[in-house]
Image (cartoon, rainbow, N blue to C red):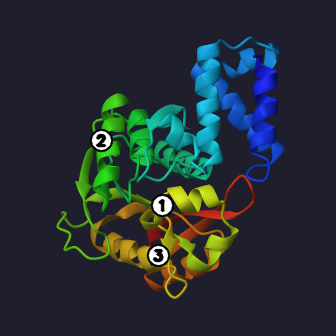
Amino acid sequence: MQTGEIETIFVQSLNGMYDDNESKALASIAIQEICHLSYGQLMLHKQILISPDHHAEILHILDELKKGIPLQYILQIADFYGHRFIVKPGVLIPRPETEELVDWILKEIQFRKWTNFKLVDIGTGTGCIPISIKIKNPHSSILGIDISDVALEIARQNAIALNADIQFLKVDILNENINFEPQSFDIIVSNPPYITTSEKSSMHMNVIQNEPHIALFVTDEDPLLFYRSIIQFALQYLKPTGLLFFEINEHLGDETIQLLKQYNFTAVLRKDISGKDRMIKAQIS
């Protein structure tokens, strides 16, 4: 079977679950991973012959996709900011918009000429944020915290695989008595749960059925619950010259800015590449 035929099978089999372009993209990634081909090779040679063994593996991936399982969980990998991360059920799949947040943080670090800074990532998940920053800043001291044992184990595996010296700790940002040295962090960053319960109906079913709800959802009654706790944490542990970064719900940009102002933070709201309110940088006024 040739690669073009596989693409057609993916489009037909996933009709109703994904649009045609998404199905073609999934087929392309599956072929690249199983057949060890580059994207460029696929584009140049549309009709590459696939061996029977590789064909069977690709069809197995298709069967899993038809069950609604995300491709990243099937392959147990996700690419993020130029690096490959381990992902498994129980940990949130890294998103492109989070890459934009990392890029903003790295540019601020470069602008301020920070080298030996101290950073904590709250709700670290796969560790994609702190690991990406550590790789670019090897002299920094970086900590990732999460409530999930599964996430922490995967984050540690990713740090080892990518040779990033990062400490990971189990911490519940909502409930635990946290004992760090006051005003010890130059940067606090978090991509906390921010999708409201009422927004579930507009989400892709493979996200709702497979990704950890603890990392995704908050109640409609208090959608800024985690932001409030992290802001209070920042008041105690962020240096006076430090920076607080958030990824946010696109519908709650103004509300998040107002919450920061209530705690005497000056904040900048930035849109993502899709033009949606997505990230915030804040400083203590």
- Up the image or down, 158 lies above or below 48; here it is below
Return the residue at label 3. Answer: 265
Q: Label for residue 156? A: 2
**Contact, mark 1 vs mark 2 (Cβ under 8 Å):** no
Q: Label for residue 259? A: none
Q: CA distance from mark 2 to mark 3?
A: 32 Å
Q: Nearer the viewer, mark 1 or mark 2?
A: 2
Q: Quadrant of the C terminus?
A: bottom left
Residue 37 drawn at (x, y percent): 64, 16
Frontmost residue, 253 versus 30? 30
- Up the image or down, 29 lies above or below 269; here it is above
Point 19% across, 63% down: residue: 180
Q: Is residue 2 left or right of residue 247?
A: right
Q: Secondary structure at mark 2?
A: helix
Q: Is residue 171 left or right of residue 276?
A: left
Residue type highlighted by circle 2: Arg
Return the residue at label 1. Answer: 191
Residue 22 drawn at (x, y percent): 75, 43
Q: CA distance from mark 1 to mark 3?
A: 18 Å
Q: In this orientation, does residue 57 appear? A: yes
Q: Earlier in the sequence, mark 1 or mark 3?
A: 1
Q: CA distance from mark 1 to mark 2?
A: 18 Å
Point 57% across, 76% down: residue: 196
Q: In this orientation, does residue 143 appear? A: no
Point 56% across, 77% down: residue: 197
Q: Quadrant of the N terminus?
A: top right
